Image: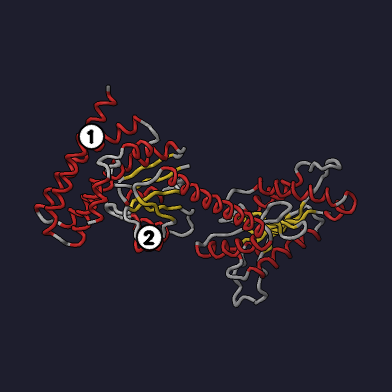
Amino acid sequence: MKILIADDEALSRRLLEKTLERAGYEVIAVENGRLAFEELCKPGGPRLALLDWVMPELDGPAVCRAVRVRSEQTYVYMVLLTSKGTKEETVLGLESGADDYLTKPFNAEELRARLRVGERILLLEDRLVEARENMRFRATHDPLTSLLNRGAVMDLLTRELHRSHREQKSTAIILGDVDHFKRINDTLGHLVGDEVLMEIANRLLGAVRSYDFVGRYGGEEFLVVLNSCDPAFAPTRAEEIRLAISHRPIQTAKGPLDLTMSAGLLLSSEWGVKTLEELLHQVDNALYQAKSAGRDCLRIASPAVRAEPPPAPLPQSVRLRH
Amino acid sequence: MNKEGQGLTEQVWNLAELLDRVDNDQELLRDLLNIFKEDFPRTMQSLESAVAAADLKEVSRLSHSLKGMLSSLGATRAAAAAAKLEALAAAGETASLRGALDALAHEAERLVPELNAYMAEVRR
């Protein structure tokens, strides 16, 4: 474990350094408070620190205060080294954010014991962070496929739509639904159905770029969001993603299965400012059209053309005629 | 008076305490003595100038540094003399600085030969 020592006096610093090395620590020794703060701010820097109270540039309590001001960073366990150890000084040191204090000259055994206390606190913090990260993952991901869950993918999509509108780009939304999925569950059982869903999730993830999103929208419905997608290529991309499901059989415990997917596609740039609900409703309509057209195909949700008669016989847009 | 009396019974150099602190590591001990030989005279010299200039802040800083160095080394009496000087500087007692510095120098005169003797002995 790494430990930082900050002491401006060379003899004490050397003594501390050697004592801690012997105790198995990886020691970083500096001679003033500013360097101490810099070391503690480095990514992967030490999380244990022994800081002398009186130091040039920044004194021990000032280093403690500076370290504590940083938020969202890993905890640093800091021990102040003082020579007086008066009650007032102790209170001042602890109030500045130090976890503990030791009076100099230190006793090696006591020093090691106090640092072990620090290690216990850091271990506790590690466990809490790990638990928090697990909870965060569970709250935003589908437990079966590990894809983003509906809530998380909607949040990301909302943000992405704002961004693409601001940057005048287009976000492509693809809603895909596995064809005749119910039959698998009914005839082969839910476990095989789960296997299929997991494999589909893998294939969808493999078919998109690292900055696109794939979420499980409902039972066998998947929502794919292609960020900053060139509208000219979107149908081709959507088709590639859709075909990733059918291009080869899905292996299951009950043998290989040939499956297809129907999908709806929507390009945000064609719709102007619309609510997320409206856009999802439209892409869902497109998916429904794909299903009605016999499944295993893609349909694009394009804004309906207004029925207002043009004031003059202007040539209609190319898209209208096709 | 009582306090002074206790001070007198303290050793000039507590070698046993130091050996305990370095875990009987002779190499480290030699290292520390070498640092001391280099840093101590230099700091004393600066301290002498600071006292002559009645620079309280500098006297406080340097005597604090000496206090740390001396106490780490187990030189209890000299460390106490440095602490006294630091306290006087902090209290702004300019008139008392000279006397306290002389006391520290006196302690150092007793300490340094002991350290030198030890180094000569272990080198053999």
Query: Looking at numbered disc 2 in the image, what kind of residue is underneath it?
Result: Thr
The residue beneath circle 1 is B114
In front: label 2 or label 1: 1
Say left or right for B22 vs B36.
right
Identity, as a three-letter code, of the amino acid under mark 1: Glu
Give the x, y percent position of residue A124. Answer: 56, 53
Q: Residue at the far top: name it.
A: B124
Question: For this view, does A43 lie left or right of residue A245?
Answer: left
- Locate residue A70: give its quadrant: bottom left
**Label 2 residue SS:** helix
- Answer with the quarter of the image where residue B34 lies: top left
Tell me if A239 is positioned left or right of A25 in this view: right
Q: Chain of mark 1?
A: B
Q: Which residue is mark 2?
A: A90
Q: Residue A317 at x, y = what percent?
A: 61, 65
The circle on residue B51 is none
Distance of label 2 from label 1 (alpha carbons): 35 Å
The residue sitting at 48% across, 50% down in the picture is A118
Identify which residue, B70 or A47, lies in the foreground: B70
Quadrant for the C terminus of chain A, please.
Answer: bottom right
Q: Are marks 2 and 1 in contact (CB under 8 Å)?
A: no
Coordinates of residue A198 in the picture (x, y in percent): 74, 48
Residue shown at 15% from the left, 44% from the top: B106
Percent of width and height locating residue B42: 17, 41
User: Quick one: B5 or A151, which is closer to the camera?
Assistant: B5
Mark 2 and mark 1 on one chain:
no
Judging depth in this view, the residue of A134 and A205 nearest the camera is: A134
Q: Secondary structure at mark 1?
A: helix
